[in-house]
């Protein structure tokens, strides 16, 4: 895989050509940026920007004003190759907070291996409210965060797309111990793998790897050539061992409605 070609393809299909990722969300192309605006529980933020030193500060101020008027916190998803080169510094100066950087990694969906599961563990597609509750429970236990908004988004997707598989959960003798989400992007080459988390006591047994490979097979069955992960430092070696390739890094810059420029 040519990393430069893949990065450009990713930018073109999933950033510049982004589509709303849930009910009530809209994609807008304004002020040299592509942004999503939706309900409070949705992901709100800037997906792509094509700025230069002359236009950057004005565009940043416009996005802050937009989301402040909506009463929404938002994220500016900045990639290492975005311009201008000092865009991150400009966001910080405007009142944003930089979160931990991640690595955009991509693999061909059909090349990932079939992996065996530990005895007593089965993978189950999330297709109803009960499955969504299990995902929320695992995320809360694995990450120590409130995952209510994720549960709302999953339920909305199931309501809008009956038969969809937005997540997979691993059950150990009926108890949810690992879960991960899947975002299919119809009409594109990519599917997104998100939120792989395993509860303490079940880590180090290959569940993360198994969930990655299982979701890749679902993505391939839906016609997606590639699977994509925004990988934390802990996940990057595992993904590399499965054949994922790093394309660039991405850093979330977050802004709350009460922040001021």
Image (cartoon, rainbow, N blue to C red):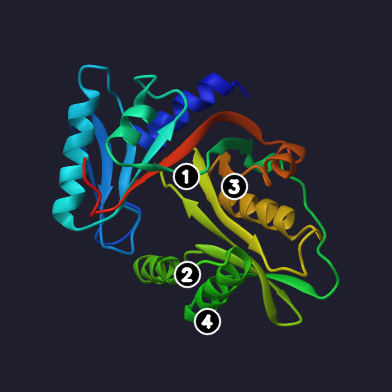
Q: Residue at x 41, y 30 (%)?
A: 11
Gap between marks 4 and 3 measured at Cα: 26 Å
Q: Residue at x 73, y 56 (%)?
A: 210
Residue 111 spot, x, y in % from top left: 71, 39
Gap between marks 4 and 1 measured at Cα: 32 Å
**Label 3 or label 2, whichever comes before in sequence order:** 2
Q: Residues within 10 Å of mark 2 (few under 14, many from 20)?
A: few
From the image, tell me which residue sits under label 3: 220
Gap between marks 3 and 2 measured at Cα: 31 Å
In this rendering, the label closer to the viewer, 1 or 2: 1
In the rendered structure, find residue 99 and report the number of the disc placed on it: 1
For label 3, the SS is: helix
From the image, tell me which residue sits under label 2: 146
**Label 4 or label 1, whichever comes before in sequence order:** 1
Residue 52 spot, x, y in % from top left: 27, 18
From the image, tell me which residue sits under label 4: 130
């Amino acid at each position: 895989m040519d990393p430069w070609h893949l990065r450009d393809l990713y930018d073109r299909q999933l950033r510049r050509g982004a589509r709303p990722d849930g009910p009530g969300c809209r994609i807008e192309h304004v002020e040299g940026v592509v942004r999503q605006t939706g309900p409070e529980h949705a992901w709100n933020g800037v997906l792509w920007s094509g700025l230069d030193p002359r236009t950057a500060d004005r565009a940043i101020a416009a996005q802050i004003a937009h989301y402040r008027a909506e009463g929404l916190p938002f994220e500016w998803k900045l990639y290492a190759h975005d311009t201008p080169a000092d865009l991150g510094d400009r966001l910080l100066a405007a009142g944003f907070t930089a979160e931990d950087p991640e690595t955009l990694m991509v693999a061909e969906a059909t090349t990932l291996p079939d992996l065996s599961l530990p005895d007593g563990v089965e993978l189950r597609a999330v297709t109803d409210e009960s499955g969504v509750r299990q995902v929320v429970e695992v995320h809360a236990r694995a990450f120590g965060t409130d995952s209510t908004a994720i549960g709302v988004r999953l339920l909305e997707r199931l309501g809008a797309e009956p038969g969809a598989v937005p997540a997979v959960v691993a059950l150990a003798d009926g108890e949810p111990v690992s879960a991960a989400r899947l975002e299919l992007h119809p009409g594109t080459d990519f599917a997104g793998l998100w939120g792989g988390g395993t509860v303490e006591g079940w880590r180090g047994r290959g569940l993360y790897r198994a969930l990655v490979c299982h979701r890749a097979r679902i993505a391939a069955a839906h016609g997606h050539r590639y699977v994509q992960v925004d990988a934390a430092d802990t996940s990057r070696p595992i993904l590399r061992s499965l054949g994922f390739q790093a394309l660039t890094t991405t850093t979330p810059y977050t802004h709350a409605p009460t922040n001021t420029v």
